Amino acid sequence: MHQRCLGSYKKIIIQSTVPLDTLDNGLEVVGGKGRSLSRLLNAGYNVPGGFQVPTSAYRKFVAENNLRSNILGLAKPAIGNGTASFEQASQDIAQLFRDHALSTEMRTEISAAYDALSGAPAVAVRSSANAEDLPELSFAGQQETYLNVTGSEEVAAAVKNCWASLWTSQAISYRHENDIDHASVAMAVVVQVMVPSDVSGILFTANPTNGERSEMIVNCSFGLGEAVVSGQVTPDTYIVDRQSLAVKKTVIGAKDQRIVSDGDQGTRMEDVPEVEKGQSSLSEGLLRELSELALSVEQEFDGVPQDIEWAVSEEKLHLLQARPITNLPPQPMQDVSWPEVSGSQLIKRMAAEVMPEPLSPLFEDLYLRALFDTQTWPEGYEYKGSQTRNFLKNFVIATVNGYAYTSIPIDGHKDWESFIGKVREEVGDIPWYRWLQIIFNPRDQAIEKGIKPGIRFLLMDPTELRHQWVFTILKWWRMLRRSDGVKRWGKVDLPTYLEGLERWQSLEPATATNEELLHGIRDLTVVEARYWHVLRRIIGAAKGTDMALQMFCEENAPNMGFASGTFLSGFKSKVVDAEMDMRVIAEQLRNNPRLYELTITTPAARFLRVLKEHPEGEAAHEAIDRYLNDYGLQVFNLDFAEPSLREAPLPFVVSLKALIRDSGFDVATRQNEVAKNRRAKWIEALKFFKGRKRIDFLRIYNTARINYPTREAAIFYMGKAWSLLRPFALELGTRLTVLGTIAQPDDIFYLTNDELQRAIAAAADGRPVAELVDQALAKRTLREQRQRLVPLPAVPPENKLGWAGDSKTFDTVKINDDDADILSGFAVSPGSVTGPASVIMSPNDFSKMKPDSILVCPLTTPAWTQLFPHATGLVTDIGSITAHGSIVAREYGIPAVLGTGNGTQVVKDGQMILVDGDKGIVTILEE
C-alpha cells in the first residue's frame, strides 16, 4: 500500500502561507507541484512569482471544523449499474467544504500574501497534493486548477475549492484503485501570477510514446496551456533532436480554439482566427530556446526525463511546472536487424503462438536446448540423408532478437523427395491382405521389408498401387480412427508427462539444497520439452484434418457457406468447463448482497485478500482456490519467467468482477445454439454433396471430428511443469539475492545456465558473483526493449521454401500495411459482426475489455478464455486455423479472423470494425 503516516493534527502554530521558493519544500509540506516549483525558483529559472499554502493549512482547516472522520466516512463507493461510483461521495464531501468557512486568521494570511504581490494581479490557483507528480503515480488531472483569479477573497475561495478537489470522484477512485490510504493525503496549494500566454504547451525531454531518449516532444497552441493539457485542442507537435536541437519533424495541428482570460475572473474559449490556424504557433528561435531550457531543467532534476509545462508571453519564456515523465518506456533499440539463420527459413508457427514475447535468457538457454535434446525420429523416418536429418532434427525453435521462430531448412526437400520415392518403391509389392494388417494394427504388425506405418501410409499415392479399390476403401476406414498420436496421448504421453512432474512434488523449496533446486529446474524443463513434441503431433493432426475439411468445402462447395469452423464447433471442452465453473463462482458472489457489494467496491488487486478476511467469504474464497487449482496452471506465455494464472490471479479477478457486473451471453444457451447450427449445416451438406463427394465429405469430416478435440485437451496441460519449477527458481533466486549475486529473486530468469552454475558454486563458499547483478539487469532491460519491437512474420520475409509452394501450410501471419483500412487474416470461425474494438495487449489490460465488443489482441492462450464471454468477435495478430483463439471462437460461436500480423497496431481501441469470419477480412469502419 502506498501510505504516508501523517499523524493527527495538534494545536500548534501553523503558517497558512509560505514563499513560493521556500526551502522547506518536502513533498509532505508543499506537495508535488510546490516542491518542483520551489526547486526551479531556487535554481534561478524564470518561474512566475507567488506563494504557497502548505499542507499543514489544509490539515488545520479540517481539524478546526472536525471534518476528518466525516470525510473518511463519506469517501466510500456506492454501487450503481454494477459499478463502484464515488460521485455521491464527492458531492457530499464538497458540501462539507462549502459549509465551513476559512478562519479569520487563515483568510488574513492568504490575503496578506496575495496583497504582497505587485498590483493585485490575476493569479493561477493550483492544487498540489502530497501524492502527485510521482514517477509511478502522476495523479494528472485528478485535482483542480483555477485560472485568472483576481482579489484576495476570490483567492481564498479558490484555495478552499482546491482543497475540496482532493475529493473529486476521480481523485477518490484513483486512490482507491491504487491502494492509497485516504487518511494519508493532504493538499497544498500553489498561487502564481498568471502569465498572459500568447503560446503555451508541454515539452517532454524524452519521447513518452516510444521511450526514445534522443528526442524531445513539444506540444503547443495559442493561448493558455490548459487547452493543450486537457486535450481540448489539436496542438502543433515538434520532434526535436536532443543532440543538435534540430527539428526532426513538425506537425501543424488544427488549433481551432484557444483558452484566454475572461475579464477579471475565469477563462473562456474562443475561436482562433482562420489565418492563424495553419501557422506554426512557435517560432524557430523560441523552439530552440525552449529546448535548451528543457535540457537544463532535466539536469537540475538529476537527469530524470521531465514533463515540462511552459508559456510564452511577449517573446519571453516562463516555466510553469516540471515533473518526471510517468511510465516512460525503456529506450528503444537502435538499428535493429533480423539476421537470417543460414540454410533456414524462420517462420511463426506454434512457437510464436505460445511464446509471443522475447524469451528470458534462462528459458531460452534451458528450454530450447531441451527441445533439441529430446527430439526423436518419428517412426518411418529412418532414412539418414543429411538434408532429411536437417528437415526432421534441427533446433526446433530458433530466436531472432529474442523472438521464437520455427526453423525450416530451405533445402530440406532434396533428400526428402528421394526418401518418399524409395518408400513408394517398397510399398508397391505389398499384397492387399497385408494392408489389412498395416491399417488396423499399425503398431503391432511386423511388416516385410522394414516397411513401417504412420506417415508412409498417408503419403502413398494409390494410383501407383495395385488393388487400388481395396486401398481406397481401407484408407477411408483407417481415416475414421484417431491418429496414432492422438491415441498415444491419452494412453502414454500424458501419463508419462504427469509422472515426470510427480517426481518433484515432494521437494520442499525452502529446505532443498541449491543443487537440488537447480536439478529440479533442469529436469522439469526437460519434462516440459518432451511434452512440446507431443503437442506438435497432436496439433499437427488437428490442423491437417481441419485444413483438409476446409479445403474440401472451399473446392467443392465454394458458395454454400460451408466451413470447418461450423462443422467442428459446439462440442464439450475444457474451455467451456472453465467458463461454467467461473459462472458458478460469479453467481455465488452475486447472490450474497454483502459479497456482491464487496466484489463491486473492492479493487481487483486486493479482492482475494479482502474476500478471505470477510466473515461470509470463506466458501467463495475456497471455490476460487479450487478454480485456480483446476484451471490456474494455464500459462499466458510458455516462458517460465512469466507467472501462471494461479500465481498471479489478477486477470482472473478482473474477469470475475466483469462477469458479475455483466454476465454477457449465457454460455450454455450459446453452446446449444452453436451445436444446433452445426447439425443443421451438416444435414445441409449431406443433401448438397452427392455420390462419391458425399462419401469424401463424410470421411474428411469424421477424420477431423475425431482428431480435432484432443488439441485443446492436450494443450490444457502445457506449462504445468512451471508450477513446480518457478517456486524452485524463486527460492534459489531469493538465496542469491541475499548473497548479493542478483538484485531481486526473479533476476534468476535473466541468468544463463552457466552463470547460474557459477553462482551456485560461489554460494557454496558464501561468495557472491557481484558482476551478475549488472549483467542480469542489462538482460532484463534488453528484453523490455525487445518487447516493443514488432517481429517479422518470417526471417527472411520473402518465402524461400520453394518446395512448400506458397508456404500456406506454414503461415500463421498475413502481411498487411500499417495504414490499411482492410486487414486480411485467416478465416477461422464463420459469421460476421460489427462492433467497437477492445484492444487488449496483455493480461495487464484485461480490465479494459468492454462488454459486447470485439476482442483485438496479439494472440490468445487458454488463460485468455475468460475474456470471451464479453466478446462478439475476435481478431489476433498471430494464429491460424488451429490456434487456441480459433477453437475457442468456434465454441462461443463468434466470428474470428486470426493472424492479421498488425491488427493491434492498426485497430484503435473503441474503433468500429467489421469482422468477416467467412472471408478472413477485418474492415475498419471509422477513423
Image (tube, helix red, strand yellow):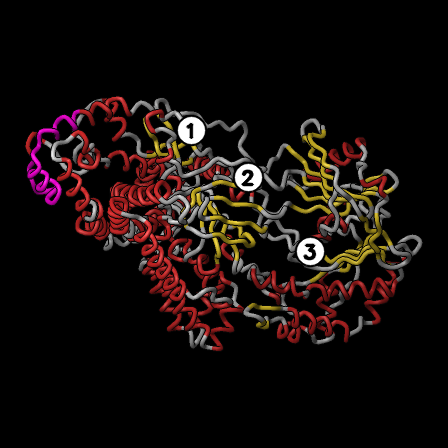
Give the residue at mark 1. 795
Dot 1 falls on a residue whose secondary structure is strand
Say whether residue 247 is visible. Answer: yes
Q: Secondary structure at mark 3?
A: loop
Q: Could you tell whether 762 is left or right of 608 in the image?
A: left
User: Label 1 vs label 3: CA separation?
Assistant: 45 Å
Residue at position x 45%, y 43% in the image: 743
Q: Residues within 10 Å of mark 1 (few under 14, many from 20)?
A: many
Amino acid, disc 2: Pro
Q: Which residue is mark 3?
A: 141
- Name the one closer to the observer, 641 or 296: 641
First in residue order: circle 2 vs circle 1 = 2
Residue 717 part of the magenta segment: no
Is the Cβ of the residue at disc 2 closer than 8 Å to that at disc 1? no
Residue 418 spot, x, y in % from top left: 21, 23
Judging depth in this view, the residue of 325 and 507 nearest the camera is: 325
Start-end of magenta stretch: 422-447
Dot 1 or dot 3: first in sequence order is 3
**Is residue 438 a member of the stretch shown in magenta?**
yes
Q: Which residue is mark 2?
A: 330
- Quadrant location of residue 472? top left
Residue 520 can be seen, yes or no: no
Q: Is residue 468 left or right of residue 256?
A: left
